[in-house]
Amino acid sequence: ALAIAPSDPNTLYLVITDGAGLLTPNGMFKTTNSGTLWAATAAQPPNVFDGFGNPGGQGFYDIALAVDPADANIAYVAGVNVASTTDGGASWTQDLDVYCSISQSLICSGSVHPDQHAMAFGAIGTPRPLFLANDGGIFSSSNATLGIVGTIWTSLNSNLTTTQYYAGASAQNFTTTPVVAGGAQDNGTTRTTSATAAQWNAVLGGDGGYVAVDNSTPTTMYAEYQNGQLHKTTNADAGTAITWTNILSGCNGSLFIAPFVLDPSNNAHLAFGGGGYVCETVNGGTSWYFDPVPSGYIQSIAIAPSSSATIYAGDTAGGIYRTANGNTGVAATWTDISTGKGLPAAPVTSLAVLPTSPNTVYATFGKFGVGHVWQTTNGGGTWTNISGNLPNVPVTSLVTYAGTAGPVLIAGSDVGVFVSTDNGTSWNTLQGGLPRVPVNMLFTDAARTTLFVATHGRGMWQIPIPSGIGLTSLSVVGGPTAGGQTVIVTGIGFGSGTSVSFGGMAATVTAQTATAITVTTPAHLAGTVDVSVTSNGFTATLRGLYTYGEVLFAPTPVPRATSVPTALPAPPTRPAATPIGVPSVVPPRR
């Protein structure tokens, strides 16, 4: 780091670190003649890059240097901690002890967050007030040169929404149980139970990462420390009394932020991405088994919502792998489904499986100059680039759900969120008040009521997904194929005023739940027809999925049922100042 003295531009300070600590034997240098001659300062500052009083540190990550605008003899150097000189480097004083780890400290500075990245000075004062920007936000001191004992630091983070969320997860239905958790860069894992006030509570420390909330019991939660340390709690709502159990310490190594996922249809089944392995548990983390994957470090992972046995994993080099025999309690067999398929040699930042088909998968890639969203409909046999008109920036996340006119795709990127309702042919921006910042993860609740955006530096945001209906399948119970046959239609969102038609002719509804309708088919011409369901003002259609076997009569022509919603409700709005929600136009779920 290099800093010039504003009051004497001939004077500059230079600090050099080898990544761990100060360069030995001299790490702080100074020139008073514009760089013609440099010399080590008479004294060297304490190793501010080391926060624990032991050899080592992280100058590779946080390093800053600044000179008081009014006095060239007053300079500050920052890493994990901060030190200063008031005599041009003849002596140094440590001003910050974030970990309270220095034995001679009478008063520590534990209220200040570690990892300093920038410093700035106030307009008046001797010395000028010092402002610190670090992994915890912004802090200030008007007397930093007094040293640890006399320094008073003040947090300036009230209502400052700058959290860098890596990932997040929600309870099964956010509208009825507003629980959201997120893992943040150097700010641990936080949790909120407020749909509007955005009051977050810290529940786990370290660098937070991926999280998961049990669909049936939202007080059961999984979260991770950095480097693959996976933890579990069953009392996430216990405040300061919350208890965690470390259930996995890496998976043959892992990325700094390792991906893991909770099975959407089995709360005891988790899959964790490691170094050339996927680790699975079928008992909520009591025991694990390692699946060897022909890959490098796993960067993304997904379990098919419709098949717990089908798991996909992507690595940092563009490899994608699939197993169809997961969730068994023994090591699964994995197959490379990317080599030679034309996919980019780039990090696979996310994988998403269509809820109704374990073989339809979307992969996103984090690199410039490549296709950023790809799709397979045959389990990885072939892949298609569906990036369309997306900007040429890394795409970090994708979610998909069944819309009223087909799958809805929503992609998070380095420049915001985009949505497609035509399978990637065209993409439209979905900002609606969302800051134009990098998106680290998109996710929804299992009920698909709400879309969440975890951003890099602007906190967590939400937007409602308009309600709709969706059709999954037909099953025949029995009866004549010309009409009068009993058929069960399965799907989601079935409510009041439900009607079913076969080829435009009304069927008789004999039983109904929110996810299944039993009908008696109308008499009809032989051949294959569409089956449509109308409920809650929406119509959804299964194209060409039912076949009549006999010709009875020529029916009176009727208009074909449409797959377009007859009454699309506008998304709910929210108070403009609430940073956890953003009103915009989101395609309805089916």
Image: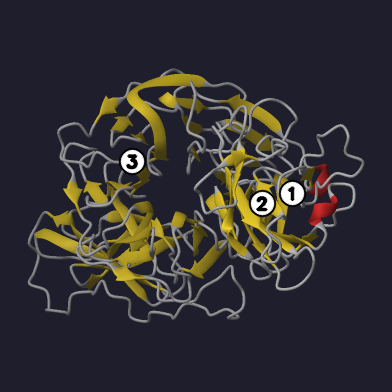
Question: Looking at this view, is 585 or 207 the one in front?
Answer: 207
- Report which quarter residue 19 is drawn in: top right
Q: Which mark is residue 190?
A: 2
User: Is 19 displayed left or right of 70 in the figure?
Assistant: left
The kind of secondary structure element at disc 3 is loop
Q: Which mark is residue 262?
A: none
Question: Looking at this view, is 62 or 419 the one in front?
Answer: 62
Amino acid tagged 3: Pro
Q: Decide which of tag 1 and tag 3 comes sooner along the chain.
A: 1
Amino acid tagged 1: Ser
User: Is 309 displayed left or right of 221 in the figure?
Assistant: left
Badge 3, how many Cα within 10 Å: few under 14, some, many 20+?
A: many
Q: Which residue is mark 1?
A: 84
Q: Decide which of tag 1 and tag 2 comes sooner along the chain.
A: 1
Instruction: Residue at 30% x, 52% y: name it.
Output: 473
Question: Looking at this view, is 73 or 298 the one in front?
Answer: 73
The kind of secondary structure element at disc 1 is strand
Foreground: disc 1 or disc 2 = 1
- Report which quarter residue 127 is drawn in: bottom right
User: Is 470 displayed left or right of 142 in the figure?
Assistant: left
Question: Residue 583: x and y, percent?
Answer: 49, 76
Amino acid tagged 2: Thr
User: Is 255 displayed left or right of 406 in the figure?
Assistant: right
Furthest toward the right, the residue is 106
Question: Residue 88: x and y, percent?
Answer: 71, 49
Question: Looking at this view, is 226 or 329 the one in front?
Answer: 226
- From the viewer's perspective, is residue 134 above or below residue 105? below
Instruction: Residue at 88% x, 34% y: name it.
Output: 104
- On-image quarter of the C terminus: bottom left
The kind of secondary structure element at disc 2 is strand
Instruction: Residue at 38% x, 38% y: name it.
Output: 307
Q: Which mark is residue 347?
A: 3
